[in-house]
Image (cartoon, rainbow, N blue to C red):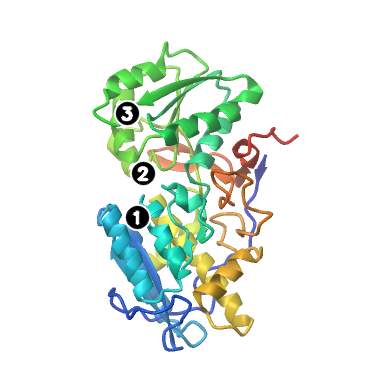
Amino acid sequence: MARRSGPRRTTVAVLTAAALLLPAAAGCGGPADAAGDGTEYTVTTWAPADRPGVTALAEAIGRDLAARGGLNGHRLRVLTCDERDSAEGAAACARQAVDARAVAVIGAFGEHADGVMPVLEAAGIPYLGGYGMSGAEFSSPLSYPVSGGTPALIAGSGRQLVAAGCKQVALVRPDTRAGDTLTRYLSTALRPTGVRLVDVKTPEKDPDFQAVARQALGQDQRGGCVSNALDPERSLKLLDAYRRLAPRNTLLASVAGSVQQSVIESISGGNGALDGALATGWYPPATSKVWDDLRTVAGGDRRIDVSDLGVQTTWVAYQVFLQAADRIHSAGQPLTAKALRAQLDSGDSLDTGGATPPLNWGMTDMLPSAESPRLTNTWVTYQQIKGGRLTEQQSGFVDVRWVLTGGRPPA
C-alpha cells in the first residue's frame, strides 16, 4: 500500500546549523567522545576516487554551513578521505576518523564496512548513512543506515512487477551468497500471487551477457518480466545485450542502483530504448523537488550528480545528522559521539525533507531480522523510465517490511 510522503520540509537552511570547512587532514588522536577544544566538531565522509560526488557533496555541505554562522556557535570540520576501493584504504579512512576524534562518519560510500566497523566500534564513533554494500552496515550496533539496502529494493521490485501484471519474473543477479539472499526476498514478494520466479545466476568472472539476457527473456511471452539486480557496470552490459535482442513482450525492471541515469543514457543514446522499463528506488527520482536543496548546495559542481544514489544517500545522512545535532544542542548538551548515538537510539523520528519517511533507530522500529537488525527504512519508491529519465510511476512510498520479515501482505 502506498503512502504519500508528507513530513515537514527540513533543510540545511532551516536547521540553524553551520560549519567551517577545514582541510581534509587527520587531526590529533584521542577519545572519540571528545569534541575538540569545545569550539569545533569533526565529521568524516569517505568514498573511492571514482565516486567523487560523495566527498564533493560533503565538502559543499561544509561550505554552505560555514556561510550560515555556526552549529550553535561551533565550527564543524568536514574531513573527506579516498578509501581507494580497498579494505586497506577504508581502514586508513577509519583511523583518520578516530585520530581526528570525529563525532560521526556520515554518508560514506564503500563496500568494506565489515572491516572498518570494529575500528569505529572500539572508538565509539557512529556510522551514519553508509551506502549499504556490506553486512556490517545492517548489523553493527553503531551503524545507522538511512536506506533499506538491496533487500528492500528487490522486495519492492517484486511487488512492483506483481502490480504490473507479471506472470513470471526472471531475476538476473550475481552468483554469490548475497545474490542467494536476493532470490529469497524476491520469492517472498511473489509468493502470495503465485507468480513464477526464474533464478538467472550471473557468474562473477567473464559472464556471457548475451546468453544471460537470452535466458532471462525465455520465449519473450506476454506476462514475462525481468528484474535486474546487477551492479551498474554489469547492468550496462546486460541491458545492451537485452536491447540487441529487441524483445517485444517482456517487461524490464531494475533496482535503482543498477539502472543509474548514466546507464540509461548509455543504452538509450537519446532514442528512448529503455522507455517503459520499471525501477524501484530508495528515494524519489532526481526530478523530484525533494532534491532542490541538494541542487542548490551543489552549486553546479559537475562532480555532484543529483541522480547518483550515493550522492543522495550522503545528502540524507547529513540531514539526519544536522537535525540530531540540533536536538542535542536544544537539550543543552555538547555534541559528542556518545550523545549522537543516544539521540539516534532514542526512537525520536528525524526528518529528511521528504527524501524518505521520517527515520529513527528505536528498538521497536528496526527490522526483527538476524541478518539485518539495524535496518529501519523499509520503504521504497516506484519509478519508470520515460523520455530517457527515471520519473515517478506513483507518488509516495511503499512499505515492504512484511516481505523482509517473511510475513504476509497487509490486508
Say few, some or many: other residues with alpha carbon within 10 Å of mark 2 (under 14 / 14 to 19 / 20 or more). Answer: many
Say few, some or many: other residues with alpha carbon within 10 Å of mark 1 (under 14 / 14 to 19 / 20 or more). Answer: many
Residue 14 visible in image? no
User: Could you tell me which residue is drawn at 66 percent across and 57 percent down?
Assistant: 363
Q: Secondary structure at mark 2?
A: helix
Q: Earlier in the sequence, mark 2 or mark 3?
A: 3
What residue is disc 1 on? 305
Q: Earlier in the sequence, mark 1 or mark 2?
A: 2
Q: Secondary structure at mark 3?
A: helix
Q: Are marks 1 and 2 in contact (CB under 8 Å)?
A: yes
Question: Foreground: 354 or 127?
Answer: 127
| Residue 86 on image: x %, y % | 27, 52
Give the foreground label among 1 and 3. 3
What residue is disc 2 on? 261
Q: Residue furthest top?
A: 219
Give the foreground label among 2 and 3. 3
Question: Foreground: 265 or 406?
Answer: 406
Q: Which mark is residue 296?
A: none
Question: Foreground: 208 or 398?
Answer: 208
Q: Amino acid at mark 3?
A: Leu
Residue 394: image quadrant is top right
Report the quarter where the C terminus lies. top right
295 above or below 4? below
Q: Which mark is residue 238?
A: 3
Residue 153 visible in image? yes
Q: CA distance from mark 2 to mark 3?
A: 15 Å
Report the quarter where the N terminus lies. top right
User: Could you tell me which residue is drawn at 29 percent across and 64 percent down?
Assistant: 92
Q: CA distance from mark 1 to mark 3?
A: 23 Å
Q: CA distance from mark 1 to mark 2?
A: 9 Å
